[in-house]
Every structure is written in structure tokens, then in C-alpha cells.
Image (cartoon, rainbow, N blue to C red):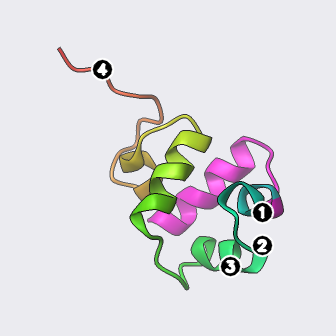
Amino acid sequence: MTKFRLRSLRKEDSRLQSEVANYLNISRQYYSEYELGKRKMPVDVIIKLAKYYHTTTDYVLGLDDVRGVKLYD
């Protein structure tokens, strides 16, 4: 689930909610609602988070369990 993935990504990188919120140009409370699953993330936020954490959008969304970027032949 996305909300659990967001928190684990943030914790793995030793980030505070306020740091991620600042990167996204939103309030900490607004970001907290993403982590709690109270607010849906727009596509542009998902893309920004994937770039921020150096991973794929599928990983951010919980659709893939491999954090690294996939390379296809």
C-alpha cells in the first residue's frame, strides 16, 4: 500500500516529514495526510517523490517491490 511505502521510504532515508514536504512545496500536515492515506497523491507528486528517492513511480505506489530502477533490453 502506498501509505506504508511512503513512510518506509522516508524512514530509510532518515528524512523528516517536513523535509519531504518542503521538497514538494506543501505543508508538513498535507504531506502527513499522504502518508496516512487520507489524501490521494496527484501524478506530479508521485513523479517528484520517485525522483527524490531515486526510485520508480511503481515502487512509490507499491506496485513493485524492487526499489532500484529497472533497465530493459
Dot 4 or dot 2, earlier in sequence: 2
Q: Which residue is mark 1?
A: 17
Q: Are marks 2 and 3 in contact (CB under 8 Å)?
A: yes
C-alpha distance separating marks 2 and 3: 5 Å
Amino acid type, label 3: Tyr
**Foreground of the two, 20 or 60:** 20
Circle 4 residue:
71
- Say which residue label 3 marks: 30
Q: Is residue 55 above or below residue 3?
A: above
Q: Is residue 10 magenta?
A: yes
Residue farthest bottom in this picture: 38
Name the spot of residue 3 as percent of width and height, x first: 54, 68
Compared with 64, 69 (above or below) is: above
Residue 27 position, x and y percent, is 75, 74
Q: CA–CA distance between discs 1 and 2? A: 6 Å
**Seen in the image, is 20 located left or right of residue 41?**
right
Of helix, strand and loop, which one carries label 3? helix
Name the amino acid, label 1. Gln
Looking at the image, residue 23 sits to the left or right of residue 54; the answer is: right
The residues tagged by marks 1 and 3 sit, at their Cα atoms, a distance apart of 10 Å
Decide whether the magenta segment is chiefly helix, strand or loop.
helix
Q: Quadrant of the C terminus?
A: top left
Question: Distance from label 1 to label 4 (Cα)?
Answer: 30 Å
Stretch in magenta? 1-18
Residue sitting at the far top: 73
Residue at image mark 2: 28
The image shows residue 13 at horizontal and vertical percentages of 73, 41
**Whole-Å distance between the Cαs marked 3 and 4?**
33 Å
Nearer mark to the viewer, of 3 and 4: 3
| Dot 4 crowding, Cα within 10 Å, few <14, some 14–19, many 20+ | few
